Protein backbone atom coordinates (compact mmCIF):
# COMPACT_ATOMS: atom_id res chain seq x y z
CA UNK A 1 0.00 0.00 0.00
CA UNK A 2 1.51 3.26 -1.08
CA UNK A 3 0.39 5.76 1.56
CA UNK A 4 1.49 9.39 1.37
CA UNK A 5 4.88 9.93 2.98
CA UNK A 6 3.85 12.12 5.91
CA UNK A 7 1.38 9.57 7.24
CA UNK A 8 4.05 7.23 8.60
CA UNK A 9 5.28 9.49 11.37
CA UNK A 10 1.92 11.17 11.97
CA UNK A 11 0.75 10.47 15.53
CA UNK A 12 -2.79 9.09 15.72
CA UNK A 13 -5.33 10.46 18.13
CA UNK A 14 -6.50 7.59 20.28
CA UNK A 15 -10.19 8.23 20.76
CA UNK A 16 -10.85 4.97 22.60
CA UNK A 17 -11.30 5.83 26.25
CA UNK A 18 -12.03 3.90 29.39
CA UNK A 19 -15.40 4.47 30.99
CA UNK A 20 -15.25 6.35 34.26
CA UNK A 21 -17.79 6.85 36.98
CA UNK A 22 -16.54 10.42 37.34
CA UNK A 23 -15.14 11.62 34.04
CA UNK A 24 -13.10 14.78 34.49
CA UNK A 25 -10.36 14.10 31.95
CA UNK A 26 -11.54 15.77 28.73
CA UNK A 27 -12.89 19.22 29.67
CA UNK A 28 -16.36 18.26 28.56
CA UNK A 29 -19.46 19.61 30.24
CA UNK A 30 -20.32 17.19 33.00
CA UNK A 31 -24.02 17.86 32.38
CA UNK A 32 -25.90 17.13 29.16
CA UNK A 33 -28.48 19.60 27.86
CA UNK A 34 -30.94 21.16 30.30
CA UNK A 35 -34.10 18.98 30.09
CA UNK A 36 -36.33 21.64 28.48
CA UNK A 37 -33.62 22.43 25.90
CA UNK A 38 -33.28 18.74 25.15
CA UNK A 39 -37.03 18.45 24.70
CA UNK A 40 -37.04 21.32 22.19
CA UNK A 41 -34.08 19.74 20.35
CA UNK A 42 -35.88 16.41 20.08
CA UNK A 43 -39.05 18.10 18.80
CA UNK A 44 -37.04 19.95 16.18
CA UNK A 45 -35.32 16.76 15.03
CA UNK A 46 -38.76 15.26 14.40
CA UNK A 47 -39.48 17.97 11.82
CA UNK A 48 -36.36 17.58 9.68
CA UNK A 49 -36.39 16.88 5.97
CA UNK A 50 -33.77 14.11 5.92
CA UNK A 51 -33.90 13.90 2.12
CA UNK A 52 -32.55 17.44 1.60
CA UNK A 53 -29.01 18.78 1.87
CA UNK A 54 -28.76 20.96 4.97
CA UNK A 55 -28.76 24.47 3.51
CA UNK A 56 -31.51 26.13 5.49
CA UNK A 57 -30.31 24.73 8.81
CA UNK A 58 -26.72 25.84 8.12
CA UNK A 59 -27.69 29.42 7.37
CA UNK A 60 -30.21 29.63 10.19
CA UNK A 61 -27.43 28.96 12.72
CA UNK A 62 -24.97 31.22 10.89
CA UNK A 63 -27.49 34.08 11.02
CA UNK A 64 -28.14 33.61 14.72
CA UNK A 65 -24.41 33.68 15.50
CA UNK A 66 -23.87 36.71 13.24
CA UNK A 67 -26.71 38.58 14.92
CA UNK A 68 -25.35 37.83 18.38
CA UNK A 69 -21.91 39.23 17.53
CA UNK A 70 -23.18 42.05 15.28
CA UNK A 71 -21.26 40.78 12.28
CA UNK A 72 -22.40 39.97 8.76
CA UNK A 73 -23.38 36.32 8.12
CA UNK A 74 -20.59 36.23 5.50
CA UNK A 75 -18.15 36.48 8.42
CA UNK A 76 -19.26 33.21 10.04
CA UNK A 77 -18.32 29.64 9.10
CA UNK A 78 -19.48 26.50 10.91
CA UNK A 79 -17.50 23.33 11.47
CA UNK A 80 -17.72 19.81 12.90
CA UNK A 81 -16.46 20.97 16.29
CA UNK A 82 -13.92 23.76 16.39
CA UNK A 83 -11.52 20.92 15.48
CA UNK A 84 -12.69 21.05 11.88
CA UNK A 85 -12.42 24.86 11.85
CA UNK A 86 -8.88 24.79 13.24
CA UNK A 87 -7.78 22.05 10.88
CA UNK A 88 -9.11 24.05 7.90
CA UNK A 89 -7.42 27.26 9.03
CA UNK A 90 -4.10 25.37 9.24
CA UNK A 91 -4.83 23.95 5.81
CA UNK A 92 -5.58 27.41 4.40
CA UNK A 93 -2.31 28.92 5.64
CA UNK A 94 -0.17 25.78 5.44
CA UNK A 95 1.63 24.02 2.62
CA UNK A 96 5.28 23.70 1.76
CA UNK A 97 7.44 26.57 3.01
CA UNK A 98 4.70 27.95 5.28
CA UNK A 99 5.35 28.34 8.99
CA UNK A 100 2.85 28.11 11.85
CA UNK A 101 3.84 29.42 15.30
CA UNK A 102 1.99 28.27 18.44
CA UNK A 103 2.84 28.34 22.15
CA UNK A 104 3.77 25.23 24.11
CA UNK A 105 2.41 23.76 26.26
CA UNK A 106 -0.94 24.33 24.60
CA UNK A 107 -3.56 22.29 22.74
CA UNK A 108 -1.58 19.28 21.52
CA UNK A 109 -3.41 19.14 18.18
CA UNK A 110 -1.77 22.32 16.81
CA UNK A 111 1.42 20.40 16.19
CA UNK A 112 -0.49 17.65 14.41
CA UNK A 113 -2.56 20.05 12.28
CA UNK A 114 0.63 21.83 11.21
CA UNK A 115 2.08 18.52 10.13
CA UNK A 116 -1.13 17.48 8.38
CA UNK A 117 -1.08 20.80 6.49
CA UNK A 118 2.55 20.13 5.52
CA UNK A 119 3.56 23.37 7.20
CA UNK A 120 6.53 23.84 9.53
CA UNK A 121 5.21 23.96 13.09
CA UNK A 122 7.30 26.22 15.32
CA UNK A 123 6.49 25.97 19.04
CA UNK A 124 7.11 28.99 21.23
CA UNK A 125 7.87 28.17 24.88
CA UNK A 126 5.70 29.56 27.67
CA UNK A 127 7.62 30.44 30.84
CA UNK A 128 7.72 28.27 33.98
CA UNK A 129 4.40 29.71 35.17
CA UNK A 130 2.94 29.19 31.68
CA UNK A 131 2.82 32.89 30.84
CA UNK A 132 3.25 34.00 27.24
CA UNK A 133 5.85 36.71 26.71
CA UNK A 134 3.84 38.65 24.13
CA UNK A 135 6.72 40.77 22.82
CA UNK A 136 8.97 37.75 22.31
CA UNK A 137 6.09 35.84 20.71
CA UNK A 138 5.57 38.66 18.21
CA UNK A 139 9.30 38.77 17.57
CA UNK A 140 9.37 35.04 16.86
CA UNK A 141 6.41 35.24 14.47
CA UNK A 142 8.18 37.97 12.49
CA UNK A 143 11.56 36.27 12.66
CA UNK A 144 10.34 33.03 11.10
CA UNK A 145 8.08 34.89 8.65
CA UNK A 146 5.07 32.85 9.81
CA UNK A 147 1.92 32.61 7.72
CA UNK A 148 -0.17 31.67 10.76
CA UNK A 149 0.13 32.34 14.51
CA UNK A 150 -2.12 30.47 16.92
CA UNK A 151 -3.07 31.25 20.52
CA UNK A 152 -5.47 29.33 22.71
CA UNK A 153 -7.19 31.70 25.15
CA UNK A 154 -7.74 30.64 27.91
CA UNK A 155 -4.98 28.15 27.27
CA UNK A 156 -5.50 24.39 27.37
CA UNK A 157 -4.09 22.66 29.43
CA UNK A 158 -2.68 25.42 31.63
CA UNK A 159 -5.88 27.42 32.19
CA UNK A 160 -4.35 30.89 32.20
CA UNK A 161 -5.45 33.63 29.81
CA UNK A 162 -4.18 36.65 27.96
CA UNK A 163 -6.04 39.91 28.51
CA UNK A 164 -7.95 41.38 25.55
CA UNK A 165 -5.25 44.10 25.38
CA UNK A 166 -2.54 41.44 24.98
CA UNK A 167 -4.56 39.68 22.28
CA UNK A 168 -5.01 43.01 20.49
CA UNK A 169 -1.30 43.75 20.71
CA UNK A 170 -0.52 40.48 18.92
CA UNK A 171 -3.17 41.10 16.25
CA UNK A 172 -1.90 44.63 15.66
CA UNK A 173 1.79 43.70 15.57
CA UNK A 174 1.85 40.83 13.10
CA UNK A 175 1.06 40.75 9.40
CA UNK A 176 0.17 37.07 9.14
CA UNK A 177 -3.09 35.33 10.00
CA UNK A 178 -3.79 35.08 13.74
CA UNK A 179 -6.03 32.22 14.91
CA UNK A 180 -7.42 32.75 18.38
CA UNK A 181 -8.85 29.51 19.76
CA UNK A 182 -11.54 30.50 22.25
CA UNK A 183 -12.77 26.99 23.08
CA UNK A 184 -13.00 27.88 26.79
CA UNK A 185 -13.78 31.59 26.61
CA UNK A 186 -17.28 31.32 28.11
CA UNK A 187 -15.62 30.40 31.42
CA UNK A 188 -13.43 33.51 31.16
CA UNK A 189 -15.93 36.01 29.80
CA UNK A 190 -13.47 38.11 27.79
CA UNK A 191 -13.80 37.22 24.12
CA UNK A 192 -11.88 39.02 21.39
CA UNK A 193 -14.56 38.60 18.70
CA UNK A 194 -15.20 42.36 18.76
CA UNK A 195 -11.61 42.90 17.52
CA UNK A 196 -12.36 41.15 14.23
CA UNK A 197 -13.75 44.34 12.66
CA UNK A 198 -10.44 46.14 13.31
CA UNK A 199 -7.97 43.38 12.45
CA UNK A 200 -8.29 41.68 9.06
CA UNK A 201 -5.79 39.00 10.14
CA UNK A 202 -7.80 37.86 13.19
CA UNK A 203 -9.77 34.59 13.09
CA UNK A 204 -11.66 33.56 16.22
CA UNK A 205 -12.64 29.89 16.67
CA UNK A 206 -15.39 28.93 19.13
CA UNK A 207 -17.12 25.70 20.06
CA UNK A 208 -20.41 24.31 21.38
CA UNK A 209 -18.49 21.42 22.98
CA UNK A 210 -17.60 22.94 26.34
CA UNK A 211 -19.98 25.63 27.62
CA UNK A 212 -23.01 24.25 25.74
CA UNK A 213 -22.48 20.58 26.59
CA UNK A 214 -22.58 19.51 22.93
CA UNK A 215 -19.24 17.73 22.48
CA UNK A 216 -21.12 14.73 21.07
CA UNK A 217 -22.88 16.77 18.37
CA UNK A 218 -19.60 18.19 16.95
CA UNK A 219 -20.25 21.83 16.26
CA UNK A 220 -18.03 24.88 16.27
CA UNK A 221 -17.71 28.12 14.35
CA UNK A 222 -15.29 30.83 13.34
CA UNK A 223 -15.63 34.56 12.90
CA UNK A 224 -13.33 36.64 10.73
CA UNK A 225 -13.57 39.32 8.08
CA UNK A 226 -15.57 38.30 5.00
CA UNK A 227 -12.54 38.06 2.71
CA UNK A 228 -10.90 35.61 5.13
CA UNK A 229 -13.99 33.41 5.47
CA UNK A 230 -14.37 33.43 1.67
CA UNK A 231 -10.92 31.89 1.33
CA UNK A 232 -11.17 29.43 4.23
CA UNK A 233 -14.56 28.25 3.01
CA UNK A 234 -12.79 26.81 -0.04
CA UNK A 235 -11.15 24.22 2.24
CA UNK A 236 -14.45 22.66 3.36
CA UNK A 237 -16.38 19.95 1.57
CA UNK A 238 -19.86 20.87 0.40
CA UNK A 239 -22.45 20.15 3.10
CA UNK A 240 -19.84 19.12 5.65
CA UNK A 241 -22.22 19.67 8.56
CA UNK A 242 -25.03 17.19 9.08
CA UNK A 243 -28.60 18.29 9.55
CA UNK A 244 -29.03 16.67 12.98
CA UNK A 245 -26.13 18.63 14.46
CA UNK A 246 -27.20 21.87 12.79
CA UNK A 247 -30.79 21.65 13.96
CA UNK A 248 -29.75 20.74 17.51
CA UNK A 249 -27.21 23.55 17.68
CA UNK A 250 -29.73 26.03 16.27
CA UNK A 251 -32.12 25.28 19.14
CA UNK A 252 -29.33 25.29 21.73
CA UNK A 253 -28.07 28.66 20.52
CA UNK A 254 -31.58 30.12 20.63
CA UNK A 255 -31.82 28.95 24.22
CA UNK A 256 -28.26 29.87 25.26
CA UNK A 257 -29.45 31.95 28.21
CA UNK A 258 -30.49 28.66 29.81
CA UNK A 259 -26.82 27.76 30.12
CA UNK A 260 -25.85 30.83 32.15
CA UNK A 261 -26.56 29.22 35.58
CA UNK A 262 -24.37 26.27 34.60
CA UNK A 263 -21.51 28.51 33.58
CA UNK A 264 -21.83 30.30 36.89
CA UNK A 265 -21.83 26.96 38.71
CA UNK A 266 -18.65 25.82 36.91
CA UNK A 267 -16.90 29.14 37.61
CA UNK A 268 -17.89 29.02 41.30
CA UNK A 269 -16.80 25.38 41.56
CA UNK A 270 -13.49 26.18 39.88
CA UNK A 271 -12.82 28.79 42.55
CA UNK A 272 -13.79 26.36 45.32
CA UNK A 273 -11.60 23.58 43.91
CA UNK A 274 -8.70 25.99 43.43
CA UNK A 275 -8.92 27.07 47.08
CA UNK A 276 -9.22 23.51 48.37
CA UNK A 277 -6.43 22.08 46.21
CA UNK A 278 -4.14 24.87 47.40
CA UNK A 279 -4.46 23.57 50.97
CA UNK A 280 -2.83 20.26 49.99
CA UNK A 281 0.88 19.99 50.79
CA UNK A 282 3.14 19.36 47.80
CA UNK A 283 0.49 20.34 45.26
CA UNK A 284 1.10 23.31 42.99
CA UNK A 285 -2.14 24.72 41.61
CA UNK A 286 -2.10 26.87 38.48
CA UNK A 287 -4.67 29.68 38.19
CA UNK A 288 -7.41 28.88 35.69
CA UNK A 289 -9.96 30.84 33.67
CA UNK A 290 -11.33 27.68 32.04
CA UNK A 291 -13.46 24.68 33.07
CA UNK A 292 -10.45 22.76 34.37
CA UNK A 293 -7.51 23.17 36.73
CA UNK A 294 -3.93 22.10 36.18
CA UNK A 295 -1.96 20.87 39.17
CA UNK A 296 1.58 19.61 39.64
CA UNK A 297 2.80 17.13 42.23
CA UNK A 298 5.66 14.66 42.52
CA UNK A 299 3.45 11.57 42.48
CA UNK A 300 1.25 12.66 39.55
CA UNK A 301 1.22 9.35 37.73
CA UNK A 302 0.56 7.36 40.91
CA UNK A 303 -2.31 9.68 41.78
CA UNK A 304 -3.83 9.27 38.32
CA UNK A 305 -3.55 5.45 38.69
CA UNK A 306 -5.09 5.58 42.15
CA UNK A 307 -8.02 7.71 40.98
CA UNK A 308 -8.59 5.25 38.14
CA UNK A 309 -9.05 2.43 40.64
CA UNK A 310 -11.88 4.52 42.10
CA UNK A 311 -13.45 5.08 38.68
CA UNK A 312 -12.26 8.67 38.44
CA UNK A 313 -10.64 9.74 35.16
CA UNK A 314 -8.34 12.77 35.12
CA UNK A 315 -5.79 13.82 32.51
CA UNK A 316 -2.16 12.84 32.99
CA UNK A 317 0.49 14.21 30.65
CA UNK A 318 3.33 12.10 29.39
CA UNK A 319 6.74 13.10 30.77
CA UNK A 320 7.73 14.10 27.23
CA UNK A 321 4.99 16.76 26.99
CA UNK A 322 6.82 20.07 27.10
CA UNK A 323 6.61 21.83 30.49
CA UNK A 324 4.00 19.43 31.87
CA UNK A 325 6.16 17.03 33.87
CA UNK A 326 4.17 15.70 36.84
CA UNK A 327 1.12 17.70 35.83
CA UNK A 328 -2.50 16.59 35.99
CA UNK A 329 -5.51 18.35 34.52
CA UNK A 330 -8.82 18.05 36.29
CA UNK A 331 -12.03 19.21 34.60
CA UNK A 332 -14.61 20.85 36.83
CA UNK A 333 -17.65 18.67 37.47
CA UNK A 334 -20.72 19.07 39.64
CA UNK A 335 -20.23 19.99 43.29
CA UNK A 336 -20.69 16.35 44.33
CA UNK A 337 -18.19 15.11 41.74
CA UNK A 338 -15.64 17.76 42.72
CA UNK A 339 -16.02 16.87 46.40
CA UNK A 340 -15.38 13.23 45.63
CA UNK A 341 -12.36 14.01 43.45
CA UNK A 342 -10.92 16.29 46.10
CA UNK A 343 -11.44 13.78 48.93
CA UNK A 344 -9.80 11.05 46.86
CA UNK A 345 -6.75 13.24 46.16
CA UNK A 346 -6.55 14.16 49.84
CA UNK A 347 -6.70 10.51 50.99
CA UNK A 348 -4.04 9.56 48.45
CA UNK A 349 -1.70 12.24 49.76
CA UNK A 350 -2.42 11.38 53.41
CA UNK A 351 -1.74 7.70 52.79
CA UNK A 352 1.62 8.59 51.24
CA UNK A 353 2.81 10.54 54.25
C1 LIG B 1 -8.14 24.37 22.99
C2 LIG B 1 -9.07 23.50 22.25
N1 LIG B 1 -9.44 23.84 21.02
C3 LIG B 1 -10.28 23.09 20.32
C4 LIG B 1 -10.78 21.92 20.83
C5 LIG B 1 -11.66 21.09 19.96
O1 LIG B 1 -12.91 20.98 20.45
P1 LIG B 1 -14.16 20.67 19.55
O2 LIG B 1 -13.69 20.11 18.26
O3 LIG B 1 -14.97 19.72 20.32
O4 LIG B 1 -14.83 22.01 19.33
C6 LIG B 1 -10.43 21.52 22.11
C7 LIG B 1 -10.95 20.26 22.67
O5 LIG B 1 -10.66 19.82 23.72
C8 LIG B 1 -9.55 22.34 22.84
O6 LIG B 1 -9.16 22.00 24.08
Image (cartoon, grey):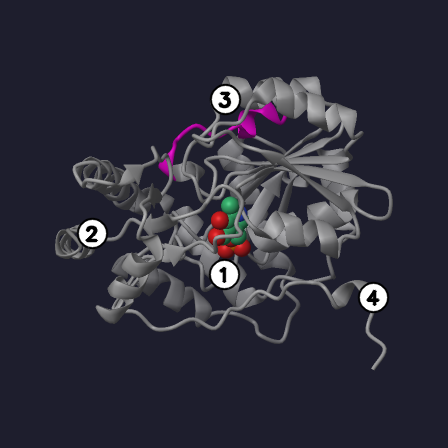
Mark 3 or 4, closer to the camera: 4
* Residue 261: % across, % down: 25, 42
Q: Is residue 269 magenta?
A: no
Mark 3 or 1, closer to the camera: 3
User: Residue drawn at (31%, 45%), measured in percent from left and top?
Assistant: 297
User: In the image, which disc is placed on residue 164?
Assistant: 3
Query: As rendered, which of 317 and 63 lies closer to the eye?
Result: 317
User: In the current view of this chain or complex, which residue is farthest to the bottom?
Assistant: 1
Label 3 and label 1: CA atoms lie apart by 32 Å
Give the extent of the magenta segment: 187-198
Q: In this rendering, would 251 be left or right of 224?
A: left
User: In the current view of this chain or complex, which residue is farthest to the front?
Assistant: 353
User: In the image, which disc is placed on residue 5?
Assistant: 4
Q: What kind of element bears circle 2?
A: helix
Q: Are marks 4 and 1 in contact (CB under 8 Å)?
A: no
Q: What kind of element bears circle 1?
A: helix
Residue corresponding to mark 1: 247
User: In the image, which disc is placed on residue 338?
Assistant: 2
Q: Are marks 2 and 4 in contact (CB under 8 Å)?
A: no
Q: Are marks 3 and 2 in contact (CB under 8 Å)?
A: no
Label 4 and label 1: CA atoms lie apart by 39 Å
Q: Earlier in the sequence, mark 3 or mark 1?
A: 3
Does residue 25 appear anywhere in the picture? no
User: Residue drawn at (27%, 46%), measured in percent from left and top?
Assistant: 262
Mark 2 or 4, closer to the camera: 4
Q: Earlier in the sequence, mark 2 or mark 4?
A: 4
Which class describes the residues within 10 Å of circle 4: few (<14), some (14-19), or many (20+)? few
Q: Is residue 193 magenta?
A: yes
Count the marks.
4
Q: In this rendering, would 223 be left or right of 38?
A: right
Q: What kind of element bears circle 3?
A: helix
Say which quadrant the N terminus sits in.
bottom right
Amino acid sequence: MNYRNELNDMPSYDGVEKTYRIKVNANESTLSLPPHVEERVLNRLGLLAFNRYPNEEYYSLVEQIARNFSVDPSQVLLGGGSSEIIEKVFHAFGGAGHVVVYPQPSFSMYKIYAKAAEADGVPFDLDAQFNLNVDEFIKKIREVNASLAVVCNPNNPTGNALTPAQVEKIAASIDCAFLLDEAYVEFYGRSAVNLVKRYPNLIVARTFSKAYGMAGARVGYMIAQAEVTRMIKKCFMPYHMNVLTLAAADVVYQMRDEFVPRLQMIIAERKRMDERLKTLPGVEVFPSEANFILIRLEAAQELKDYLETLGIGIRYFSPSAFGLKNCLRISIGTRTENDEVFSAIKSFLEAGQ
